[in-house]
Image (cartoon, helix red, strand yellow):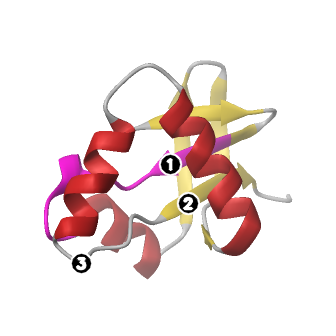
Amino acid sequence: MYFTDGGRVVLIATNFGAAKNPGWYCNLKADPIVELYGRGFNESFATPEIYGDERDSLFQRAKDAPGPCGKYEDIADAKNRYVPVMVSSPKDP
């Protein structure tokens, strides 16, 4: 799932609670520079994984939104998987 936060795109790697992270997460870890198109975006973004308080705050926003994000976290937790959060920010020219 994803949502926007100002000019950033927040990506939540729930993978529906599966035991492994989604493939796109692995791709972004290998190369965090991406081109985003759509919903007003058409540019290069840097997409690092975030940790700590910022990760927890953004993940809580995802869980508070309508949808199954919290359920997916519970399923992933039962499989001993931490759900990563990545934030795409416009790349400096």
Q: Earlier in the sequence, mark 1 or mark 2?
A: 1
Write down the residue under mark 1.
11
Disc assigned to residue 45: none
State the quadrant of the N terminus. Answer: top left
Q: Position of residue 2 (x, y in %)?
A: 49, 37
Disc assigned to residue 80: 3
Magenta residues (range): 9-20
Q: Position of residue 71 (x, y in %)?
A: 28, 41
- Which residue appears at 24% of the width and 62% of the height? 76
Q: How many marks?
A: 3
Residue 84 highlighted magenta (yes or no):
no
Q: Residues within 10 Å of mark 2 (few under 14, many from 20)?
A: many
Q: Position of residue 7 (x, y in %)?
A: 79, 36
Mark 1–mark 3 distance (CA, rounded to whole Å): 20 Å
Which of pointers 1 and 3 indicates the residue nearer the eye?
3
Residue 17 highlighted magenta (yes or no):
yes
Q: Is residue 28 above or below residue 12?
A: below
- Which residue appears at 85% of the width and 58% of the height? 93
- Which residue appears at 63% of the width and 55% of the height? 87
Q: Residues within 10 Å of mark 3 (few under 14, many from 20)?
A: few
Q: Earlier in the sequence, mark 1 or mark 3?
A: 1
Q: Is residue 49 left or right of residue 20?
A: right
Disc 1, SS: strand
Write down the residue under mark 2.
86
Q: Quadrant of residue 3?
A: top right
* Badge 3 amino acid: Asn
Mark 1–mark 2 distance (CA, rounded to whole Å): 5 Å
Q: Quadrant of residue 56?
A: bottom right
* Badge 2 amino acid: Met
Q: Position of residue 65 (x, y in %)?
A: 52, 25
Q: Are marks 1 and 2 in contact (CB under 8 Å)?
A: yes
